[in-house]
Every structure is written in C-alpha cells, then in structure tokens.
Image: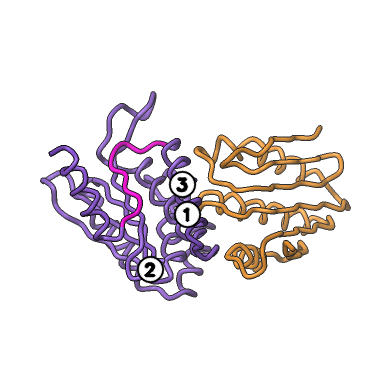
Amino acid sequence: MSTLHIPATERTPELLFDFAANTFSLKGESYPENIAEFFGEPVGKLKEHLGAQAGQRIAFHFALPYFNSSSAKTIMGLFSLLDQAAEDGNDVLITWTCEEGDDMQEMGEEFAEDLDAAKFELKFLE
Amino acid sequence: MLASEMFDLRDTLGQQGITFCYSGYMTEGILLGIGNAIKTQMQLGDADAKVTKGVFAVFVEQVQNVIRYSAEKIGNEDSSELRYGILTVGSKDDVPFVACGNMIETKDAERLRDSLTHIKGLDRDGLKALWKETLRGETPEGSKGAGVGFIDIARNARHGIDFDFRKVDDAYVFFTLKALL
C-alpha cells in the first residue's frame, strides 16, 4: 500500500499514513462536517494494513490542538486498533503532542488508560 | 424608528451580556465563520486560552446539535436540508456562556430531560467515566454523531450547565441548553 496524504483544512487535520514505513500521523484541529466521509476510508485502510503486520515497529503520532466529540470516537477507535496491533506482536508507539496542562493532555491520558500492549508517550509543545 | 428598533434589540442582548447572537438556519459554513469570530474576539480580549478553547468546543457541539437534530427544518435529508436554531455567546459576571435553543419533537423531550438531568448530576470523574463509556459503546439510535456531545459540553462547562423546555404546541417543545464556562 502506498502513502496516503490528506492536507489539513481549517477543520480537518493533516493525515499522513505511510504504510511502507509504518508511520502514521494526524496533525491539526478536527471537527469535520461529516466524520465518516473524512475518516472512513483511511481508518478502513489502516485497519486492513495493521491486521497484516507482525513483528513490525509501528508509530502513530497525534498532534491535535482541538477535536470535537465525534472525532473523539474515531480517535478512541484508532487507539484500540493500535493496541490490537501491539497485542498481535508488533512494537507499537503512540505519541501524543499537546501543550502542557491543556485539556488535550487530559484527553490523551484518558485514551492511553485503555492501552494494554501499545506504548504511549506524551510530548509537550515548547 | 428603524435605528431605534435595532438599537433596542442590540441593547436587550447587551444587557444579558451577549456578544454573539445568531437566530436562523444553521449550516456548517456558519459554524466555521462564527467559530473563527468567537476565537478571534476572545483572543483579542485577552481571554484565558483554556477558557477560549472551552467556549469554542461547546459552541461547536451546540451548533452541530442544531444542524443535525433541530425539529424545525426545511428540505429533506436526501438532498439538502436546513435546520433552525438560536445561539448566544457572551459573558455575565465574568463567567462566559454559550446557550443554544431549538425545537424538538414532544416525544423526544422526556428522554432528553432524563439524559441531561443525569449528566448535570455527575461530578468530573462521573462525567469522564460516562464519556468513555459512551465513546466505547454503540452509537445510540437516532444519533448521527457519537452521541457524546452533551457529555462533552458538560465536561467543558466548569461552572455547570442549565437546560429548560417550553411547550410550543402538542407536537413541539422548545429546548434550551446553556453552558457556563
């Protein structure tokens, strides 16, 4: 599978899924008009891709200064997919970039509470 | 006369601390435009960054609720439709607020009241738990989003939420939700 790149808009994040390198990122504010239209296809491809990985190093980077409640559901789903990939024997690292003390820090930590196998790292913006 | 009428309306809004008011059909374009204006206005007014983000977050959930669920609408879901609501954003006694109102069908009022009464009674940890539970679960029947919008609003409303219902006729009730940040 090749690289999937969707540039950011005012209300959707930059999406960069490099399937060959197993590095994935979402950067920017997320409050799409239609959540399924934006995330449906990329998340479907990711799910398919992760299901076929074994013994790989996989990295997913989130840098979301704001997301709405329907995006939260998608993000929780991504955490769950990544955790499953880790349970299947991959080395999975999720990094979460935000401002220290921001509500987004709390959100990241809350999503991370449910992880059993994937590693989670908080990074603060300078 | 014309200027007096408009000035009086502006004055009425001002007395309630309202800085933004929109009444009409709501669209995603309006959400984007007013949202940017709210952010800019709060930043220029030196509002705390956390409060600004909270106001913006509540505003997005409130407007998306109207766009998706207001019972007062024209057009139809298959082609294009517009749904009507009223939104106010402002600050009273240094407490910012976002209030929104729209028509709902009478049959939905009780479910909505129960759900909001439950949410209003929860503390921070209770809201967090319900938020996660709702995100994990299946989307409730009749919901086009995650069904988690009201919980999200309550989590952002550090000074609480208020809601009210007013009967319009046998079929419709006017519903209002106000978040204090």
| Distance CA(mark 3)–CA(mark 2) | 19 Å
Q: Is the magenta stretch mostly helix, strand or loop?
A: strand
Give the residues in magenta: B18-27
**Magenta segment: does it hold B22?**
yes
* Residue that carries the numbered disc 2 in the rendered image: B95
| Distance CA(mark 1)–CA(mark 3) | 10 Å
Closer to the chain start, of discs 3 and 2, is 3
Residue at position x 76%, y 61% from top?
A118
Residue A1 appearing in the image:
no
**Disc 3 packing (10 Å; few <14; some 14–19; many ≥20):** few
Which secondary structure lies at badge 1? helix
Q: In which quarter of the image is residue A21?
A: top right
Of marks 1 and 3, the one in the foreground: 3
Which secondary structure lies at badge 2? strand
Chain whose colour in the figure is purple: B
Q: Where is residue A62 in the image (x, y as percent from the top left)?
A: 70, 53
**Disc 2 packing (10 Å; few <14; some 14–19; many ≥20):** some
Chain whose colour in the figure is orange: A
Image side of residue A77 versus residue B64, left or right: right
Disc number placed over residue B56 in the picture, else none? 1
| Distance CA(mark 2)–CA(mark 1) | 14 Å
Dot 2: chain letter: B
Relative height, residue A68 to residue B114 (above, below) = above
Disc number placed over residue B37 in the picture, else none? 3
Quadrant location of the N terminus of chain A? top right
Along the viewing direction, whichever of B66 and B145 lies nearer the viewer: B66
Q: Position of residue B62 (x, y in %)?
A: 38, 51
